[in-house]
Image: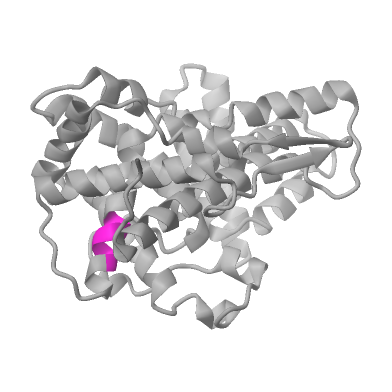
Amino acid sequence: MIMKLDPIVERACTWSLNTIIWSYHSAVIIPTDIKEEGRKFENKELKKLLDHISKGHIPYQQSLLTYLVYFLGACFQNFKINNVKKKVDDETVEILINAFFDTAKRYSKDKSVGYQPCIIEVNNKKYDFNKKIINSHLPKLTKADIKNITSWFVNNYKTAEPISKIFIGAGHYFNLENTGYMNQVAGPGKSNTTALIELLPGNFEKFVGTGLRKDVALRLSYLYMNEAYSPRLHEHYVDKASKKSKNVLKYAKGEWIKYFYLRASSSLRMIEIMFTSGKPGNEKDIKDMVNEMSRMDFLDIIYLCSRKIALSENEKEKNNLLIIRDLIEEYRLKTK
């Protein structure tokens, strides 16, 4: 039996799940163009897209520690917003984690609960991927597993950077969304989708240690923090948890989200192909591509380029990447 939740806790539960589902829908389903109205697909192409989407929940499922810390950050921030004093102790955190899973069960049992947009109608047939992403947040944990996560979190959330970054970052995001910050672009009760997606976070001075990034859109915050901190979160649990739970390790070991990495990797690969082909006009195409990048995309591709240079054992590849990185930086500077 699922018990009725305190409204403050329930709001944090639904906000966290809705944000995660929105992230999955936006990062996994929307880029395939499978929801484009009136579009028809050949059977082979459709099968490939559906296979891709059907596996898209896995990085979310394998991020157990990330999504629980994210939820806890939102929940304790909601306590603050409502002037409710709560200690971050074992008893409270254990109750909250159970509340999160109870809410996920409600989503799974009732399609009308929360944000469930992952229904695809294509070639006159419906495919429902809501259950995939929701059930990926219903791991088979025992009471002992939840106590284990609780103890690890309570003992380390103040001092371990990967935990505190997500905890403070989620609270930061929750605060901005629930105290009127987002109304500046959408207006109360309105929905300017493009403006909301592009809105950058603010009020950093109020959230020292936040995991949000000034050049990453607020709506992409979960994707960014999952990608940036999940590996370190898992590493911290392995190194510092007083006891290791097999189930926790199973659902927290990754693979994790690679949204920004894959986007930067795709762009860098295109630039590498154009650079090595030596065709006339390619230099202009590279310039145009770099000039159209957002600051976030530019920083991500420079980071990826530097990482590949450091890891490459092929001198020719390394030299090409060094030249490409210099060109990208040069073209970017000329546009400023």
> Of residues 74 and 157, which is closer to you in this image?
74
Q: Position of residue 310 (x, y in %)?
A: 41, 29
Side of 29 where 212 appears, left or right: left
Q: Residue at x 8, y 27 (%)?
A: 242
Residue nearest the viewer, comparing 272 with 32: 32
Q: How is the model colour-coded?
A: one colour
- Give the answer, above or below, for where 246 lies relative to 254: above
Q: Is residue 6 above or below residue 89?
A: below
Q: Is 25 situated above or below 174?
A: above
User: Which quarter of the rendered picture does the C terminus lie within?
Assistant: bottom right
Please determine whether, in this image, residue 206 is positioned above or below residue 122.
below
Residue 26 percent coordinates (x, y):
62, 48
Q: Is residue 274 magenta?
A: no
Decide whether the magenta segment is chiefly helix, strand or loop: helix
Q: Quadrant of the N terminus?
A: top left
Task: Give the number of callouts.
Answer: 0
Between residue 238 and residue 297, name the one nearer to us: 238
Corner quadrant of residue 90: top left
The reply to whether residue 217 is in sight is no
Residue at image position (54%, 59%) is: 295
Q: Residue at x 46, y 35 (%)?
A: 60
Seen as rendered, the residue at the extreme front is 1
In this view, the residue in front, 108 or 185, is 108
Residue 160 locus on image (x, y percent) = 16, 44
Left or right, 333 with respect to 125, comes to left
Q: Can you see residue 118?
A: yes
Q: At which x and y percent is residue 121?
A: 80, 41
Magenta stretch in the rendered image: 73-78
